[in-house]
Amino acid sequence: MSFVLQTEIDHLAGRIERAFLRRGARWNSSCSTPRVWAAAARILRQCGLDDPALPTDPELYVAAQGIDPESVDPWTDLASPLAVDRYRRRVRSIVRQLRSELSREIRKAERSIEGGRPAAEVLAGRDPRFSPLGRYIVARRAGLDDLAQRWSDGALIQHQGCPLYREACVGLLPDEDYPRESEAVPAPRRSLLATVASSN
């Protein structure tokens, strides 16, 4: 294993262990081995390689597991095919939730525009229920590229906070119109779990 890959696995393993212990799980090192964290990290990394729609997010990976603090087996909870299935289901659930939220925003804005309000007025309004990405999508779908550009920085920051928005936009916006990550404004790195929790 290359030094770079081992460093990545070690970093992921450390984050997985900390997230697991924050769940209140009572892990007994005499009954298991610390290798479980590295095994879980390799599984999580492989998930992302096998399915690019699955983020390599250790905190979300641990949160997706049904860990019972009274009966803890990290090998089963984190390093098994069942753990991967739970993670995949959780990510799909988040994507559905994000798509539903964006769809509501888009419908509301497009109804207002179809009702005769100017698109610039609808999208520039102070309605906190319209996210920058939602505004960007509405402008793109209306062919108003100049107006879309006004929201592109905010949409990119929203994407950086939760890259699952790209998957959530499938069917709402052509992939080539999705905000380009190469133009992204630097934003603080956050776990997807923190991002999703803050939106609820």
Image (cartoon, rainbow, N blue to C red):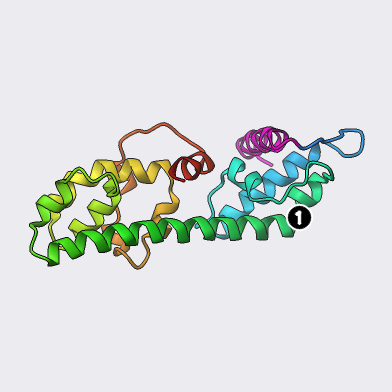
Q: Residue furthest right?
A: 30
Total numbered circles:
1
User: Amino acid type of disc 1?
Assistant: Ser
The image shows residue 3, relative to residue 44, as above or below, that is above
In the rendered image, residue 38 lying in the magenta stretch gets the answer no
Q: Residues within 10 Å of mark 1 (few under 14, many from 20)?
A: some
Residue at screen point 74% across, 35% down: 24
Q: Is residue 177 left or right of residue 139?
A: right
Q: Which residue is mark 1?
A: 80
Q: Is residue 66 left or right of residue 138?
A: right
Residue 50, image x and y in percent? 58, 59
Residue at screen point 50% across, 42% down: 197
Residue 169, image x and y in percent? 36, 60
Q: Is residue 81 left or right of residue 151?
A: right
- Of 167 and 5, nearer the camera is 167
From this viewpoint, is residue 141 visible?
no
- Of 102 and 128, nearer the camera is 128
From this viewpoint, is residue 174 visible?
yes
Query: Magenta region: which residues?
Result: 1-24
The image shows residue 97, relative to residue 45, as above or below, that is below
Residue 153: quarter of image: top left
Residue at screen point 63% across, 45% down: 63
